[in-house]
Amino acid sequence: MIIDVHGHYTTAPAALGQWRDLQMAGLQDPRRTPGAADLRISDDEIRETIENNQLRLMRERGLDLTVFSPRASFMAHHIGDFETSSAWAEVCNELCFRVSELYPAHFVPAAMLPQSPGVDPRSCITELVRCVEQYGNVAINLNPDPSGGHWSAPPLSDRSWYPIYEKMVEYDIPAMVHVSTSCNACFHTTGAHYLNADTTAFMQCLDSALFQDFPSLRFLIPHGGGAVPYHWGRFRGLAQALNKPLLEAHLLNNVFFDTCVYHQAGIDLLSRVIPVKNILFASEMVGAVRGIDPQTGHYFDDTKRYIEATPHLSHEDRSQVYEHNARRVFPRLDAILQRQGR
Ligand SMILES: [Zn+2]
């Protein structure tokens, strides 16, 4: 079985974007602010966007199931205030839930949180609980920088984040550490901000005792871990200099990397440097990089090809990366699959 742990509803019907535009117009003129009921998307519209895009590509590539969350760049937590993010998260999470209801064998939802710059992360608990208990979400996306590229929030090791971690531990759900749109012109959203944030989140964890406080807390660092695997020696050396335990004990029971690296050499490096138990298959499809690689003739984000071709993974290793690691890191996903007899 092949589980893609990193997919977003990037192809949602246009009505969702129009609802968001109205919501933003409402920040200037509150009379224009839409309610949740003003978003009207039929099941057929959802089917059309999923079957022609994600599901079609999953079938072509032989992927069985995707952990599916709202479009990351659309979260844009820097827009408006907590009320803005709260209403937006509600409609986006409901839409992913509906996808999972229409295609229970192929999509399992993960939630975005109603984060807002300067607002206590504790404010996100209500939506987190709703998504786990009512919608069956198996994970959350946690934005370490709700300011959108200005990094005004404290590091992930700060105690202000702890209420979210306590809830994650209670529900036994992981978080994918995932930023959103950059509103800082220095950082291109998907080319710089995302990768910076992956690297930054890892270093925040390294330079902390977070996982001593939460031994069962689990973070998935997407996009292959940003620069982390490539610079593994630097991080090992920094851990040593900072009098931290070896990275295997300090971080690798809690931090995992996905395979959203869009060329063979990158996956070869990832699978050589990072232990197999810490690598989870993902493609982030249909996502940031949608083109075909002229060197291979295949889509850049067809990441299964690189996993198949890398010399560093045995047959058994591949099944860990494709399935068993995901079932271990996402226990609620495993429970759903078991109920489905898979
Ligand atoms: Zn993503």
Image (spheres, grey):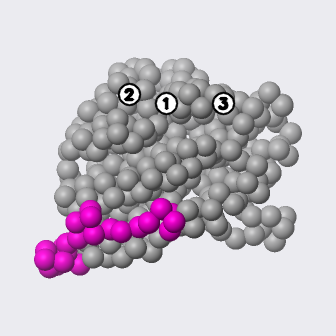
Q: Amino acid at mark 3?
A: Arg
Crowding around mark 2 (Cα neighbors within 10 Å: few <14, some 14 to 19, many 20+) is: some
Indicate left or right for 233 with 100 as reference.
right
Whether 113 is drawn above or below 95: the answer is: above
Question: Along the polypeptide, which appears first: circle 1 or circle 2?
Answer: 2
Residue under circle 3?
342
Between marks 2 and 3, how big is the CA–CA gap? Answer: 22 Å
Indicate left or right for 171 with 64 as reference.
left
Secondary structure beneath dot 2 equals: helix
What span is colored magenta in the figure?
25-46
Q: Main secondary structure of the magenta part?
A: helix
Q: Label 2 CB, ligand 1: below 8 Å?
A: no
Secondary structure beneath dot 1 equals: helix
Question: Along the polypeptide, which appears first: circle 2 or circle 3?
Answer: 2
Residue under circle 1?
332
Q: Quadrant of residue 28?
A: bottom left
Is 329 magenta? The answer is no
In the image shown, does 221 or 317 lie closer to the viewer? 317
Residue under circle 2?
171
Task: Please state which of the two labelled residues, at mark 2 or mark 3, is closer to the viewer.
Answer: 3
